[in-house]
């Protein structure tokens, strides 16, 4: 067995490289199961792929699945999105944290394991990747300062909702300026007194050339920011009061951004098909 699994190599690998807890990188993937395949997709992802294709991999240390029922899909903006076409596409979202400094190591494993899963017919084909990207962590803004969960807790803490927000800029310099504006001014102001405990900000990285063919290359590598808002309330309970104007985030001023998606989700209940009948 040792020869088959190369067990002796694991002790050697563990002795080198970063092994902190910061979410230096993330995989954020929004997927649309094809009509009529919703139950089969959900069971495949929860019963097999979430583990074999994600959590069992080295350096991917936290994960959570989210779902957008039809009611939540209808809250999305803008109507004409550069990310989701139509804007309601992508009813399941999975988010994963990867240890800072371990992106290259993780990518080597994930490409290899997904080739193996495909070869062994353990990949559900009746789905479309609407927005799938590995991302580098840029900043986390907290509502309550040093109190409360940190960003490395975010996918394990029982948050009641999540908002995925994608903002585009004209170029790398504009993105850097917008990031600074969001981090220091706009996000602290919006978080104050809101049901959102934190916002994590990421920027997309290119997918490797040997990625799976059904996952398209990442757009906006030099121009895009991805924000995850972690909510202590169901987004439907607080949308109008606190988040209905998120489409204007970053607009105007000297570091303008263009919001291409604001999409609320609630957590799935692992091991169940709860919400599958409310997607259409």
Image: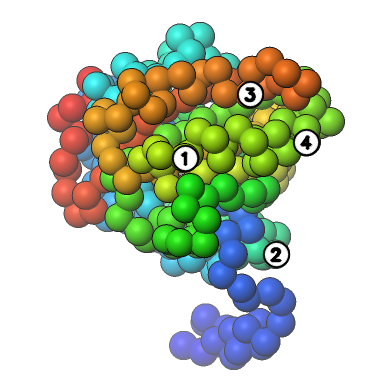
Taking the image as shown, residue 114 lies to the left or right of residue 219, namely left
Does residue 118 appear anywhere in the picture?
no
Question: Would you identify the image quadrant in which residue 177 lies?
Answer: top right
How is colour applied across the structure in the image?
A: rainbow
Q: Please give the label number shown on residue 101.
A: 2
The span from disc 4 to disc 1 (Cα, nearest Å) is 23 Å
Q: Please give the label number shown on residue 250.
A: 3
**In the depicted view, which residue is nearer to us: 253 or 87?**
253
- Label 4 belongs to which residue? 176
- Select label 4 or label 1 by which is in front: 1
> Of helix, strand and loop, which one carries label 3?
loop
The span from disc 4 to disc 3 (Cα, nearest Å) is 12 Å
Taking the image as shown, residue 265 lies to the left or right of residue 104, namely left
Q: State the residue lying farthest toward the right.
A: 173
The span from disc 1 to disc 2 (Cα, nearest Å) is 32 Å
- Label 1 belongs to which residue? 192
Q: Residue at x 49, y 23 (%)?
A: 246
């Amino acid at each position: 067995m040792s020869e088959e699994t190369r067990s002796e190599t694991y002790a050697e690998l563990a002795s080198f490289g970063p092994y902190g807890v910061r979410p230096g990188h993330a995989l954020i993937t929004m997927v649309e199961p094809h009509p009529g395949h919703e139950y089969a997709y959900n069971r495949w992802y929860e019963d097999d792929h979430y583990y074999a294709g994600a959590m069992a991999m080295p350096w991917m240390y936290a994960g959570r699945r989210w779902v957008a029922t039809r009611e939540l899909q209808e809250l999305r903006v803008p109507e004409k999105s550069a990310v989701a076409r139509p804007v309601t596409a992508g009813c399941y979202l999975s988010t994963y944290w990867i240890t800072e400094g371990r992106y290259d190591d993780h990518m080597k494993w994930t490409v290899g394991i997904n080739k193996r899963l495909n070869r062994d017919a353990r990949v559900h084909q009746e789905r479309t990747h609407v927005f799938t990207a590995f991302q580098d962590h840029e900043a986390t803004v907290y509502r309550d300062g040093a109190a409360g969960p940190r960003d490395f807790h975010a996918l394990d803490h029982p948050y009641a909702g999540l908002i995925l927000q994608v903002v585009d800029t004209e170029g790398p310099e504009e993105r850097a300026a917008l990031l600074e504006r969001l981090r220091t001014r706009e996000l602290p102001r919006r978080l104050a007194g809101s049901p959102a405990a934190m916002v994590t900000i990421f920027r997309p990285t290119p997918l490797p050339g040997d990625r799976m063919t059904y996952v398209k290359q990442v757009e906006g590598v030099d121009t895009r920011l991805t924000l995850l808002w972690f909510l202590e309330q169901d987004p439907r309970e607080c949308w109008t009061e606190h988040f209905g104007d998120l489409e204007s985030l970053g607009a105007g001023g000297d570091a303008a951004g263009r919001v291409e998606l604001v999409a609320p989700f609630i957590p799935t209940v692992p091991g169940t098909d709860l919400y599958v009948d409310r997607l259409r």
